[in-house]
Amino acid sequence: MSIPMAYMRGEFMPLADAKIGIMTHAFNYGTAVFEGIRGNWNGDQGELYLFRVREHVERLRQSAKIMRMELKASDDELVGQIHELAVRSEFREDVYVRPIVYKSSEVLGVRMHDLQDDYLLFLAPFGAYLDPEAGARCMTSSWRRVDDTSIPARAKVNGLYVNNAMAKTEAQLSGFDEGILLNQDGHVSEGSGENIAILRRGRIITPPPQDNILEGITLETALRIAREELGLEVEERTIDRSELYIADEVFMTGTAAHVTPVVEVDRVPVGDGRPGPVTMQLQNRYFQAITGRLPQYAEWLTPVYSGAAVGA
Ligand code: PMP
């Protein structure tokens, strides 16, 4: 039977049994860093493929380092535990794995030092986040993307995500699917949970890390597929809001959102207002890659069941 599982304090358990106390520092002050990893189901092969687990674990470690948090497990241990979590959960559909490194001490007082660090993992079924076929209708958020001088923007800090949550809620309550945040300089940074890219004159353009984006693993994946499979050129440079209105295509990338076309920004249609052809070609190759249908990208995948090294 499929059941969402968790790994906490060295043990696997049903997610429903994984609890923390209400005085936990991370719960009170957002002092934690996290990751999101997808497992993508391939029904034809009867296999679930975890996507780029090692890269997510590396980014988790970088987030922890920036926040001066100790992550006691090695990369190999974490990769193994994530795999075992998926094996034990037994899902035959798309799933999401959430690792969190957190300040586990149950004490009051705002700080990062002199506190215990711990980590946990959990898994839950997770379908589409944005609509990858219809595309996303976006608005420019009135909230600005948090600056690296306020909270490290390239770390996935739990507390930082209040910024993203405000943008997402503003967008949805205003009738849009997603919010696009500008940085403090007024340049395009990213979506509330996605990186953003535009296509102009056959080139893909994405904002650089110093525009306070999260250095996305899906973006890096999509850009590699764009270069290698579609022969497209890629450029990293600052993008202005008004450039979104005149781009030939706009798309978003993220673990949750995959590769999703943006069909409208601030009620201005992108191109003719339908998902762009290059974006859809890219999305198609990306979906093939993440579900184990492109052997040249097999190194990105951890097959959960056939590769099960676990006695479960
Ligand atoms: N930006 C933000 C703010 C995100 O939360 C995410 C999702 N992790 C991304 C971009 C995309 O990153 P990735 O492709 O690594 O999931």
Image (cartoon, rainbow, N blue to C red):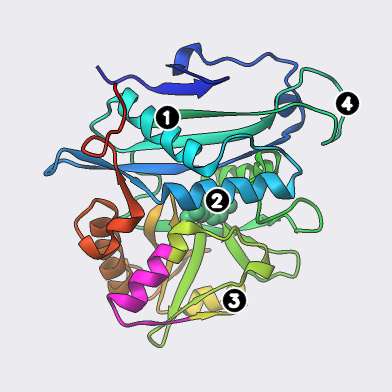
Residue 70, position in %: x, y? 70, 37
N-terminal-most mark, 4 or 3: 4
Residue at the disc numbered 1: 123
Asked whether residue 148 is in view, the answer is yes
Q: CA distance from mark 3 to mark 1?
A: 36 Å
Q: Amino acid at mark 2?
A: Glu
Dot label at residue 109: 4
Q: Amino acid at mark 3?
A: Ile
Q: CA distance from mark 4 to mark 2?
A: 29 Å
- Front: mark 4 or 3: 4
* Residue 204 higher or lower than 45, as above or below: below
N-terminal-most mark, 3 or 1: 1
Residue 185, position in %: x, y? 75, 70
User: Which element type, helix, strand or loop, lies under badge 2?
Assistant: helix
N-terminal-most mark, 4 or 1: 4
User: Which element type, helix, strand or loop, lies under badge 3?
Assistant: loop
Q: Amino acid at mark 4?
A: Gly
Q: Residues within 10 Å of mark 2 (few under 14, many from 20)?
A: few
Task: Give the residues in magenta.
Answer: 221-234
- Front: mark 2 or 3: 2
Residue at the disc numbered 2: 58
Q: Residues within 10 Å of mark 1 (few under 14, many from 20)?
A: many
Residue at 63% from the left image edge and 34% from the top image edge = 72
N-terminal-most mark, 1 or 2: 2
Q: Residues within 10 Å of mark 4 (few under 14, many from 20)?
A: few
